[in-house]
Image (cartoon, helix red, strand yellow):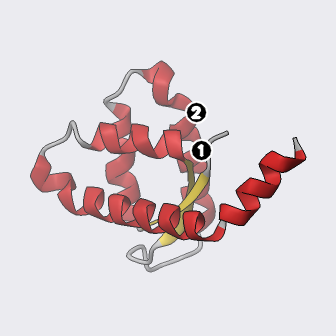
Amino acid sequence: MDRILSIELNLEEGSLLLTALAECPFKTVFELIGKLNHQAHLHFTEISDHTLRRPFEFTEQELALSMKALGRLPYEHVHQLLNSLNRQQALQLQTEDNHTPGHSRKKHADH
């Protein structure tokens, strides 16, 4: 099962991500685009400061797809967002790995 990651984006970054995903084959991204639009609607409709970062939930697979889509756009437009996504992903996975060794052993022992 894919882990869920909470990635903070502001409205501009979210829009750039949706632009990148829109360039991908529809069948591979339509669910993710809908999910991100729904989260953006919840986070930004009542906030006047759209530079605030809000948490968006991604599975690891969805984040990988998003980063791949961003990688197809011109570097000067996406490098800051890609760096931020990589940093947030690494931090969360590192934090999770530091907290789960005993938990994962127990989980395997229960099966």
Query: Which residue does the image show at 66% across and 62% down from the upper left?
Result: 101
Q: Which mark is residue 31?
A: 2
Residue 44 in view of the camera:
no
CA gap between label 2 and label 1 equals 6 Å
Q: Bin the neighbour count of mark 2 within 10 Å (Cα to Cα): few under 14, some 14-19, many 20 and up.
A: few
Query: Which residue does the image show at 54% across and 38% down from the upper left?
Result: 32
Q: Nearer the viewer, residue 1 or 20?
A: 1
Q: Secondary structure at mark 2?
A: helix
Above-or-below relation of 47 to 14: below
Residue 56 in view of the camera:
yes
| Horizontal relation, residue 104 to residue 98: left or right | right
Residue position marked by numbered label 1 in the rendering:
35
Query: Which residue does the image show at 67% across and 39% down from the upper left?
Result: 1
Q: Nearer the viewer, residue 45 or 53?
A: 53
- Where residue 104 sits: x, y (%)? 72, 55
The mark tally for this picture is: 2
Residue 40: quadrant of the picture: bottom right
Residue 105: quadrant of the picture: bottom right
Tag 2 near tag 1, CB within 8 Å: yes
Q: Secondary structure at mark 1?
A: helix
Above-or-below relation of 107 to 111: below
| Horizontal relation, residue 98 to residue 50: left or right | right
Query: Which residue does the image show at 62% across and 49% down from the upper left?
Result: 3
Quarter placement of the C terminus: top right
Q: Nearer the viewer, residue 85 or 23?
A: 85
Q: Which mark is residue 21?
A: none
Which amino acid does the dot numbered 1 rest on?
Answer: Lys
- Where residue 103 sits: x, y (%)? 75, 62
| Horizontal relation, residue 44 to residue 49: left or right | right
Q: Nearer the viewer, residue 94 or 86?
A: 94
Q: Bin the neighbour count of mark 1 within 10 Å (Cα to Cα): few under 14, some 14-19, many 20 and up.
A: some
Which amino acid does the dot numbered 2 rest on?
Answer: Glu
